Image (cartoon, helix red, strand yellow):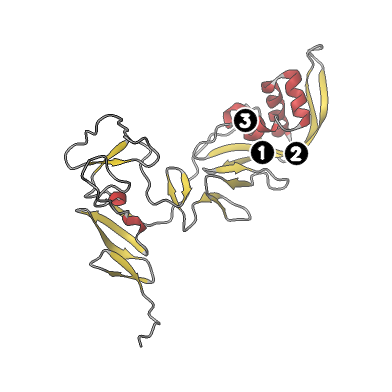
Amino acid sequence: MRFTRAKTAVVLAASTWLSPLIAAKGLNKRDAASLDVCGQVNAQLTIPSTTFPFAGVPLGFINDCLCVSTLPQYVKTNIFAIEAVTIAGTDATIAELTSMINSCNGRTECHFPAHAVPQCKNGNPCFFTCQDGYTASPSTKPTECVCASPYTECNGQCGVYRGCPSTYIAKRELVHDCRDGFTACRIPGGSAKSYECIDTRTELESCGGCLYGTLIKGHSLLGEDCTTIPGVSDVSCIKGQCVVRKCMPGYILGGARAQCMYYDENQVEL
């Protein structure tokens, strides 16, 4: 396996055009990237009367910047929306608020990237912050959520990781039945008998042995995560050994291509 450090970019998924009468439920679940509708609402919240079908009940004036996807939470915190839910129910209240967003003067279709949390602002309805450890970039008018250095991405999370096990791991609780050439390596956070089968001869993050130990008795050799070698830019795991192909600027190859050494060309030896 080979690793090359590169800057990743968030690619927004293509979305279909939203009609003015879009239903709120379709936007509550945020996928890798999503399309939302936001706007500054300045209108009276009115719900249908249960006594007179063709009459409306005015509950209060809404003066908030709202996104359709955030309405399920909004109806739990706004006093007028809470009263509307008590009278007409959650679905009817969200439907009315959705209509108010779609009919407001500042209605805007917003494309939110993965890990974004909509933070509708008056004058900037598509503003957002990021979750899961990601950072909004650029800071003033962000367009993406990035995993900024020195953090790395692991299974949809941004943080500091010594290794990143696959999200699709076959966990076996009774016996380890890895095929020849593979080792039963322990899974961090799993049960005492959970493991995944790894070829430690080529696995970049468990090179030469299991990063978190093995279930096989008598095998105590721990592996190395080649991607964590300081200054490395391009590295492979070959026959259980980390082999550095290229170092980052300011570093030079050293130690039989097993490491990158910091190099200061201005340093004068005494």
- Disc 3 marks a residue whose amino acid type is Ser
At horizontal 78% and vertical 13% (from top left) the residue drawn is 50
First in sequence: mark 3 vs mark 1: 3
Q: How many marks?
A: 3
Residue 47 in sight in this render? yes
Helix, strand or loop for disc 1? strand
In the rendered structure, find residue 38 and report the number of the disc placed on it. Answer: 1
Q: Position of residue 248 (x, y in %)?
A: 37, 66
| Residue 77 lies in quadrant | top right
Question: Mark 3 or 2 closer to N-term?
Answer: 3
Q: Judge whether 209 appears above or below 173 on screen.
A: below
| Left or right placement of residue 120 versus residue 170 in this view | right
Mark 2 falls on what kind of element?
strand
Q: CA distance from mark 2 to mark 1?
A: 10 Å
Q: Position of residue 235 (x, y in %)?
A: 29, 58
x and y percent of residue 217 in the render? 22, 41
Disc 3 to disc 2, how far (Cα)? 22 Å
Q: Residue at x 39, y 77 (%)?
A: 264
In this figure, which residue is indicated by the disc labeled 3? 19
The residue shown at (29%, 45%) is: 213
Q: Looking at this view, name the residue that lies furthest to the bottom.
A: 270
Residue toward you, 255 or 10 = 255
Residue closer to the observer: 217 or 135: 217
Amino acid carrying label 2: it is Asp
Q: Which residue is mark 2?
A: 64
27 with respect to 243 (left or right): right
